[in-house]
Amino acid sequence: MIPKKSTRIRKEEIVQASLRVIGERGANAMTTAAIAEAAGMSESNIYRHFGGKLEINLALTDFIGAALAGRAATIAAGSQRPVEKLHQIFTGHLALIAENPGIPRFIFSEEVHLGDRRLAEKMAIWIGSYLETLAGVVAAGIAEGEFRQGIAPRETAMTFLGMISFTAIRWSMSGFAFDIRDESARLWDNFAELLR
């Protein structure tokens, strides 16, 4: 007999299946039937773990937020130089997007922007946490003399995130026609020059 999977594992599988559906067909195609098919389980099993689409979307938001803001906080607490920390955060963010094309399609979807306000509010909290971490790394770089004086930590963090977001949107709109990692390498080199 196959052992039963834990609730945590099932929820993770549902979140990953949701991201696959969104990445392949868009946020509007994310129905419980489509998720169940992508996850290889019944729709009733989806409802056993989530009360509906909003709960799945909130779990998606937490997955994305924890993956980005959580990883950034871990890197920021490390002992590398600030520029190395920013580079790690940058490449990690774009690698996560490359592995999960549904992320930009979800974040920029009407579901997040015009749907239930709790979803947008939760996303805003994660983004705020991420920006705060990035701004802290930039401030440390300025204080240590690695980044030039006169740049504003928060605005630099927003530029950093905007650079990633715009690249992700272009990549998604192109049907993933270019290698986002190659593009990101060129962007990073230019951004790092602007910091010095």
Image: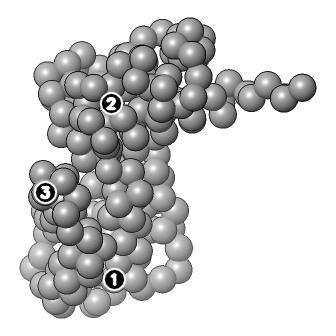
Question: Which quadrant holds residue 84?
Answer: bottom left
Secondary structure of residue under mark 1: helix
Secondary structure of residue under mark 2: helix
Instruction: Give the amino acid at mark 3.
Output: Ser
Residue, disc 2: 122
Q: Earlier in the sequence, mark 3 or mark 2?
A: 2
Secondary structure of residue under mark 3: loop
The local crowd at label 3, few if under 14, some if 14 to 19, many if 20 or more residues have their Cα within 10 Å, is few
Q: Please state, as top left, top right, bottom left or bottom right, where the N terminus lies in the image.
A: top right
Residue, disc 1: 83
Across and down, in percent, residue 71 comes to: 48, 58
Q: Residue at x 33, y 25 (%)?
A: 30
Q: Tell me: residue 139, above or below residue 155.
A: below
Q: Residue at x 39, y 65 (%)?
A: 95
What colouring method underlies this structural image? one colour
Calculate the distance from the C-alpha at mark 3 to the C-alpha at mark 2.
28 Å
Q: Earlier in the sequence, mark 2 or mark 1?
A: 1
Instruction: Give the amino acid at mark 1.
Output: Val
Q: Tell me: residue 96, above or below residue 3.
A: below
The local crowd at label 1, few if under 14, some if 14 to 19, many if 20 or more residues have their Cα within 10 Å, is some
Instruction: Give the amino acid at mark 2.
Output: Lys
Residue, disc 3: 174
**Visible in this render: residue 17?**
yes
Question: Which quadrant holds residue 161?
Answer: bottom left
Q: Residue at x 84, y 28 (%)?
A: 3
